[in-house]
Amino acid sequence: MLSKTLAAGTWLCIFIVAFASHPVQPQKPPKHKMPAELKAASCCKEVKELKAQVANLSSMLSELGKKQESDWVSVVMQVMELESTSKRMESRLTDAESKFSEMNSQIDIMQLQAAQTVTQTSADAIYDCSSLYQKNYHISGVYKLPPNDFLGSPEMEVFCDMKTSGGGWTIIQRRKSGLVSFYQDWKQYKQGFGSIRGDFWLGNENIHRLTRQPTRLRVEMEDWEGNLRYAEYSHFVLSNELNSYRLFLGNYSGNVGNDALLYHNNTAFSTKDKDNDNCLDKCALLRKGGYWYNCCTDSNLNGVYYRLGEHKEHLDGITWYGWHGANYSLKRVEMKIRPEGFKP
């Protein structure tokens, strides 16, 4: 009996020791995510999506930038092509206008030249555009004046304005397209240059012959805003080459605001190779034209032709100081003459 009791106690002790050395761990409940952690995960996802959108936008902006640059180059090329086309069309339009006028008066001119071969007196002579007007040639355009031994005048092609202020005007200078350079030498200004249907200088020798009778001068101007002005002089004379084609003017009238040609009165003509001005500087070189330079200019009607966008940047342009000042180059200029006693 005692031995059984000891055996049972022994097993009890072993069980207690085993239980003590390996205690049973309580089972922890499963860990649940807190709301802050859920927010953080959601935020990271949105950030990734935003980064992807930013990357896509950057790519699109880059592509748009490249396309814009390509489109800009294309626009510039088209503008250059349009400017070139505009110049060609302007030249063609000028030719078409002149040819139309010439066609209308061609038969009359041929008859006029035939009649001129038997001219005996100065009263019958075809001297200039006013002479043509008096013989009922009232269409503006190009005419060929036949030679006349009585007057000592050679054959000469002229452009006649038969409409302005009664008509009868012989145009001696025109600037309207910029296709002809007026930075010419003495010989060129003496004999004339350019296109009689476009931009031209009739020639100092021809102008001298035309002003041997009392002559009136009219200067017509247009700016780049489309405004028109004119200046007229009751008397206009160009002396001969021996006197360097010196200019003499009479009284001024007009609406241009200031007599900018008065400063050039009684001055000799100068070119880049013949300096006749009243200045230490060579005005023809500075103003890049042939003109009656004093020291140097109040007007420069034979200066450089500057187009819209460049016409306010230079001192050597086509200027009339009394209207737009020294650095505004005009869009169009015409100088024309007719006898003082002309009556339409």
Image (tube, rainbow, N blue to C red):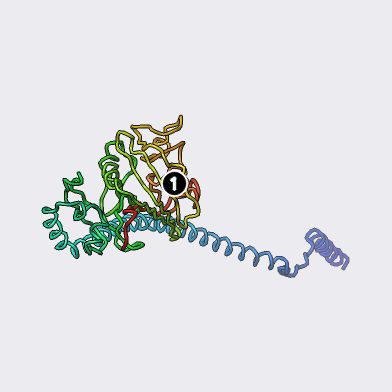
Q: Residue at x 13, y 59 (%)?
A: 110
Q: Position of residue 321 (x, y in %)?
A: 49, 48
* Closer-to-camera residue (17/126): 126
- Residue 39, by quadrant, is bottom right
Q: In this rendering, is residue 149 above or below 45?
A: above
Count of numbered labels shown in the rendering:
1
* Residue linked to disc 1: 261
Q: Mark 1 Cα within 10 Å, few/some/many (few <14, many 20+)?
A: many
Q: Residue at x 39, y 58 (%)?
A: 75
Secondary structure of residue under mark 1: loop
- Residue 162, by quadrant, is bottom left
Q: Quick check: 96 left or right of 220?
A: left
Which residue is outermost to the top?
280
Q: In this rendering, is residue 126 above or below 45?
A: above
- Residue 118, by quadrant, is bottom left
Q: Amino acid at mark 1?
A: Leu
Q: Position of residue 137 (x, y in %)?
A: 22, 63
Q: Position of residue 206 (x, y in %)?
A: 26, 45
Q: Residue at x 45, y 51 (%)?
A: 252
The N terminus: image quadrant? bottom right
The C terminus: image quadrant? bottom left
Q: Quick check: 19 left or right of 63?
A: right
